[in-house]
């Protein structure tokens, strides 16, 4: 595996970790909001964001190892579906959080 590919894989892995940490921060904020407002929607947003955060953080390391192995084998590294699913999930959590703030 070339240095350029390894660097690209590390940057992608770090981006997944940043996304997971951002979701963890959102989970903490939604949890605080749930304590203040005492609404089931706030609890749902906190739980959803926390589950997403743990999932992304856990998956990022596995994704890094699988991508590194595929690059060593000179095979395609195509993970568009998980990125699309994560994008949809983050947007749904963001909409839920926005609804909590507005209402």
Image (cartoon, grey):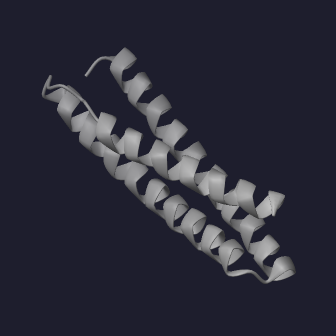
> Does 37 appear above or below 27?
below
Relative image position of residue 58 (x, y in whole percent): 42, 59
Name which residue lies at 44% across and 61% down.
55
Residue 70 shown left or right of residue 36 in the figure: left
Relative image position of residue 91 (x, y in whole percent): 56, 47
Residue 33 shown left or right of residue 4 in the figure: right
> Does 69 appear above or below 57?
above
> Does 93 appear above or below 83?
below
Q: How many numbered marks appear? A: 0
Residue 78 shown left or right of residue 13 in the figure: left
Q: Closer to the camera, 43 or 71?
A: 43
Name which residue lies at 38% across and 15% down.
4
Among the 4 quarters of the image, the one containing residue 45:
bottom right
Among all residues in the image, which is located at the extreme right?
Answer: 36
Name which residue lies at 65% across and 70% down.
46
Relative image position of residue 21 (x, y in whole percent): 62, 53
The C terminus appears in which quarter of the rendering? bottom right
Residue 31 shown left or right of residue 68 in the figure: right
Name which residue lies at 52% across and 38% down.
14
Q: Closer to the camera, 5 or 50?
A: 50
Relative image position of residue 73 (x, y in whole percent): 13, 28
The N terminus appears in which quarter of the rendering? top left
> Does 34 appear above or below 75?
below
Among the 4 quarters of the image, the one containing residue 40:
bottom right
């Amino acid at each position: 595996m070339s240095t350029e590919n390894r660097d690209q894989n590390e940057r992608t892995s770090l981006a997944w970790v940043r996304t997971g940490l951002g979701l963890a921060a959102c989970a903490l904020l939604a949890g605080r909001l749930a304590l203040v407002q005492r609404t089931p929607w706030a609890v749902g947003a906190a739980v959803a964001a926390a589950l997403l955060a743990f999932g992304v953080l856990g998956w990022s390391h596995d994704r890094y190892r699988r991508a590194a192995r595929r690059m060593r084998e000179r095979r395609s590294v195509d993970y568009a579906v998980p990125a699309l699913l994560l994008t949809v999930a983050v947007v749904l959590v963001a909409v839920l959080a926005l609804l909590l703030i507005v209402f």
